Image: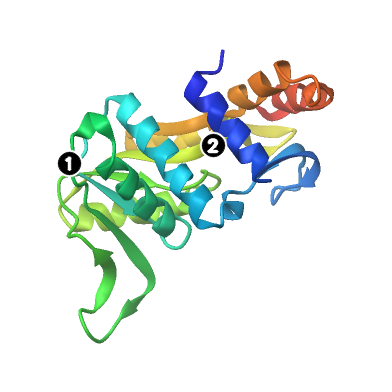
Amino acid sequence: MPGTHALAFVRFALEHGVLRFGEFKTKSGRVSPYFFNAGLFNDGACVGRLGKFYAEALVNSGLEFDMLFGPAYKGIPLATTAAVALAEHPVLAGRHVPFAFNRKEAKDHGEGGVLVGAPLAGRVVIIDDVVTAGTSVRESVALIRAAGAQPAAVLIAMDRMERAGTLGNLSAHSAVQDLEQTYDLPVISIASLTDVIGLLDGDQDLNTHREAVVAYRAQYGI
């Protein structure tokens, strides 16, 4: 059953067109009955609320952490807004959580380097929108370890719970599971495909999409 926080996030994504139902061709060539594009959280009000969802998911996880890291490019505003929300979170009692992010290309003047923000130190949570190939997470883990810090977890908005590969040669695991196993890192998500189906179960207007989403999960899901 979806949690209240996760279901509220799914509804929020739907309201802003970030979550859509229909037919969408993905990079893998699959035709998905739903699409999630966090890039459409693109105004101040909704990004501020998005940060609160990230902060709440992180606090609710009970994970011990020291700072946030946002991989370029999508992770940069996500880590920023999550840090703001954490500073206002009642459970953290005014604790100010530092954050950092990386550049795609090293800067050869001024402070130089590829890292911007607080120095990487302690237990670092990597913040992104979704995990597909996991490339940004792998690069982030390498940067964090090179700085002498410890990757503590990955925090994402949506876990698609979807296996990689072709229909005749599907991976045994999802991209999230592969990351967890490869790096021995927990992956925390605000919501998942289970929560999307929970929304469809409880909404008469959207229930017409349920059969297609459930069939897609049966074909490609974990």
Secondary structure of the residue carrying tag 1 is: loop
> Crowding at label 2, few (<14), some or many (≥20) Cα neighbours within 10 Å?
many
Residue 155 location, x and y as percent?
A: 40, 39
Amino acid at the residue labelled 1: Arg
Residue visible at 23% across and 79% down in the picture: 112
In this image, 152 relative to 30: left or right? left
Q: Nearer the viewer, residue 24 or 191?
A: 191
Quick check: can you spot residue 53? Answer: yes
Quick check: can you spot residue 181? Answer: no
Q: Which residue is mark 2?
A: 158
In this image, 95 relative to 141: left or right? left
Amino acid at the residue labelled 2: Met
Residue 95: which numbered mark, if any? 1
Residue 43: which numbered mark, if any? none
Q: CA distance from mark 2 to mark 1?
A: 26 Å
Q: Where is 33 relative to 205, above or below?
A: below
Residue visible at 81% across and 27% down in the picture: 209
Residue 212 location, x and y as percent?
A: 81, 27
Q: Where is 140 relative to 172, above or below?
A: below
Residue visible at 20% across and 60% down in the picture: 118
